[in-house]
Amino acid sequence: MFSHLVDRITTMLQSDREVRLKGFEIQFHFILIPDGGCGTESREKHSILNKTSVNCIKNKDNNCFWYALVNLVYANHGKIKEIKMGRKIQTDLAKDLCSHCDMTWDMKVALDDIEIIESKLNVNILVMDIDNLPILKSTSSIYNSLMYKNNKIKSTVQYWLLFDNDHYHTINNIKGFIAVKHFCHKCLNGFHHKKAFDEHKCGDECEPLSKDKPKVKS
């Protein structure tokens, strides 16, 4: 297109026609063509919360932690869609979960309180900081992006939450959240290729995560 424009200008200047350059204007119009790639790679807050790997928690009380956690504990529930949509069943199950952990409903859950909940459920809960997220598709450890990780409790069940200005959201899929194909829950490294994942070594024996969910009162 540019070469065509140059040819037209050259032809005009070489002709006998009078050319008034004072009023000469060139206008360019650019069209952004979608490339059909994966989802957004932006790390702006609105893009993060709109990712399919995140379930955004909206509430008017102090129970966002329980709403976020219940989405993970009951991930295989027959009404998980209603739970994630914030219907009454989400509140009912969240209250049961809070009671099971001997915690007080409608009281904020601080990072220091999470260890009690992990012990009751025999799980590991990891909390990522929305203001310090790793670069997407990075194969380095995401350890520095964590606001909370308890090394005392050893469990093969791992839940991920996103901390956003004194508020919790659910990370449904950590691999999707950081845009990698493979992830080691021991050393917290992401991998794009299965061979690299299979051959990597970390401080602990890399066992697969358990598919069993913790038993809670229903």
Image (cartoon, rainbow, N blue to C red):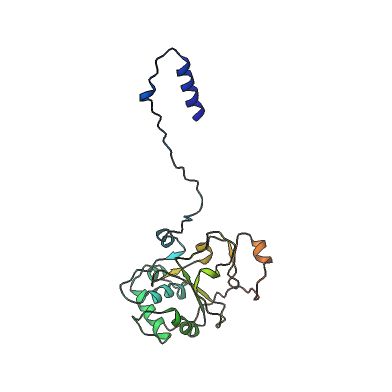
Residue 133 spot, x, y in % from top left: 49, 64
Residue 6 spot, x, y in % from top left: 49, 25
88 displayed left or right of 44? left
Q: Residue furthest front?
A: 22
97 or 200, nearer to the observer:
200
Residue 45 spot, x, y in % from top left: 41, 61
188 or 77, nearer to the observer:
188
The residue sitting at 48% across, 66% down in the picture is 132
The residue sitting at 46% across, 14% down in the picture is 15
Q: Quadrant of the C terminus?
A: bottom left
Q: Residue furthest top?
A: 16
Rendered image quadrant of residue 52:
bottom left
Q: Is residue 92 above or below residue 200?
A: below
Q: Residue furthest right?
A: 199
Q: Is residue 1 in view? A: no
Q: Is residue 24 in view? A: yes
Rendered image quadrant of residue 55:
bottom left
Total marks placed: 0
70 displayed left or right of 198? left
Residue 190 spot, x, y in % from top left: 58, 64
Q: Residue furthest left?
A: 60
